[in-house]
Image: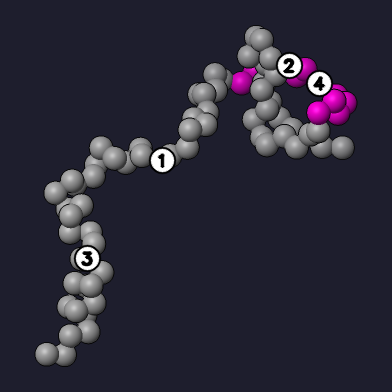
Amino acid sequence: MLAVQGYYDGVSIKPLEKLIAKPNQRVIITVMDEFVEHQAPVNKKGLRGVLAEYAKTELIGKKKEAWEHAMVQKYDNA
């Protein structure tokens, strides 16, 4: 048996934790007397691109040469 916390949003029950259950698996739902504060919607798109606004576009061209330049500076004995 597995216990998972969640809340009822007025339409359906939303788990607050990862729920590992198979389709048509029986569950026991217990309604508590406690209330939770409104949960912010989960961004299911992921975090890809969220820092794009902070990118320094003028440095993108230098990216290809950065590793080579750093190694020359670090290990160049000339």
Q: Secondary structure at mark 2?
A: loop
Tell me if mark 3 has few (under 14), some (14-19) or many (20+) residues whose alpha carbon lies within 10 angstroms of its own: few
Colour treatment of the image: one colour
Q: Nearer the viewer, mark 4 or mark 1?
A: 1
Relative depth, front residue between 14 and 67: 67
Circle 3 sits in a helix, a strand or a loop, which is it?
helix
Residue 72 is labelled as none
Quarter where residue 24 is shown: top right
Q: Earlier in the sequence, mark 3 or mark 4?
A: 4
Please rate how many residues cluster around mark 4, counting C-alpha atoms within 10 Å: few if below 14, some from 14 to 19, many from 20: few
Image position, residue 60 (x, y; %): 20, 52
Q: Which residue is mark 4?
A: 30
Q: Position of residue 17 (x, y in %)?
A: 66, 35
SS label for mark 1: loop
Indicate which disc, 2 or 1, sits on the residue closer to the N terminus.
2
What segment carries the magenta color? 23-36
Quick check: 30 left or right of 62?
right
Q: Residue at x 81, y 21 (%)?
A: 29
Residue 48 image position (x, y, % from top left): 41, 40
- Discs 2/1, front: 1
Foreground: disc 2 or disc 3: 3
Q: Residues within 10 Å of mark 2 (few under 14, many from 20)?
A: few
